[in-house]
Image (spheres, rainbow, N blue to C red):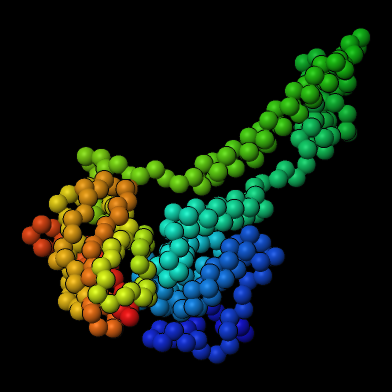
Amino acid sequence: MAESPGSQDEGTGARRGRRPIRPDPESGPVALLAHRLWELKEQAGDPSFADMASRLGAAASKSSLAAAARGSALPSWETTWEFVRVLAVDRLGRDPAEVRREWRAYWEQAANTAYAENEAPMPESHPSSPDSRPPAGDVGPRGGPRGGPHGGPHGGPHPGRRPSGRRTAVLATVTGVVGIAAVLVGWVLPMIMESAKSEPDPPAVPSPSASPHDDSAFEGDVTYPDGTVVKGGTSFDKTWRLRNAGNVPWQGRYLTRMNDTPCKAPKRVGIGPVLPGESVDITVRVRASETPGRCKIFWKMTDEDGTPLLAAKKPIFLDVTVA
């Protein structure tokens, strides 16, 4: 039995046993998306899912990340983006907006194609075909028309009156048209609704009755990604991009340095103001140390008095090598 994509050592990132079998990109749109995720993971050094969820800071569990790469079911856009963000943006230093547009298109292609292939109901028979039309009248016990108010004494047609062929044809045509319309509405309307759901939601605007929810999302390093080599004694500008992911406007907030290193940086730098749903670029001026070595500085969001905010969030950091 093949090992699942999540079978990895959480501490070292080393995989145990045989490598997982990747999904065949030819087997369907969801498998193609998973195959692309595997390719990106290899380009970024093939970290374990445990490392992606902990050390690299993905806002998704390692089991969710592994399931996305398995290709058996379409992952949510949020899980897909966290998989891609920590590898393409944080690890490989690619442009966050460009990466987001590219992978959103991949995800929507998989979602729409999978829906069209697996969920859109196809009519089993044409509603105007003879097999699907209802009978024009009731049938008597011997197979002939049942007697009624206008029938003869034995259930046949009234003497001297013949059935109207034109009325029967019109009734059959109307029935067929109504059936076609009903099937088209039942078939096309869910596809339109699904397409509308795939559009990105607009930024949430807080309403007076909404419960306050303060949250942030790290969107990537704009300059000097992790591992960049800088010359000793030089100054440079480090920039991150954060998004207000809650419904509380950010005002009077700062990034406050949490540790000291041979590299010099300001104690804190201002943020915002930032409305819910908006992104902001935050820049600090850093002077590299005169001696070679690693320089890693951590920052956390605080208020004006230095009180930490969003305590459950991991700090953002600068990580460069001084040569």
Query: Relative to 75, is 238 on the left or the right?
Result: left
Q: Position of residue 267 (x, y in %)?
A: 14, 66
Q: Identify the residue shown where x is 79% and y is 24%.
A: 173
Q: Is residue 246 left or right of residue 91?
A: left
Q: Is residue 264 left or right of residue 153?
A: left
Residue occupying image coordinates x 68% and y 30%: 181
Residue 216 falls in image quadrant? bottom left
Image: 128 above or below 165:
below
The quarter holding residue 262 reads bottom left
Furthest residue toward top? 160
Q: Is residue 265 above or below residue 174?
A: below
In this view of the protein, can residue 245 be seen by the observer?
A: no
Residue at the image point whose x is 54% and y is 75% from the top: 42
User: Between residues 121 and 197, which one lies in front from this camera angle?
Assistant: 197
Residue 27: x and y in percent read: 69, 65
In the displayed structure, would residue 243 be above or below residue 51?
A: above
Residue 201 appearing in the image? yes
Q: Is residue 311 left or right of residue 122?
A: left
Of the pair 289 and 23, the residue shown nearer to us: 289
Residue 83: horizontal and vertical position, in percent? 46, 66
- Front residue of 43 and 307: 43
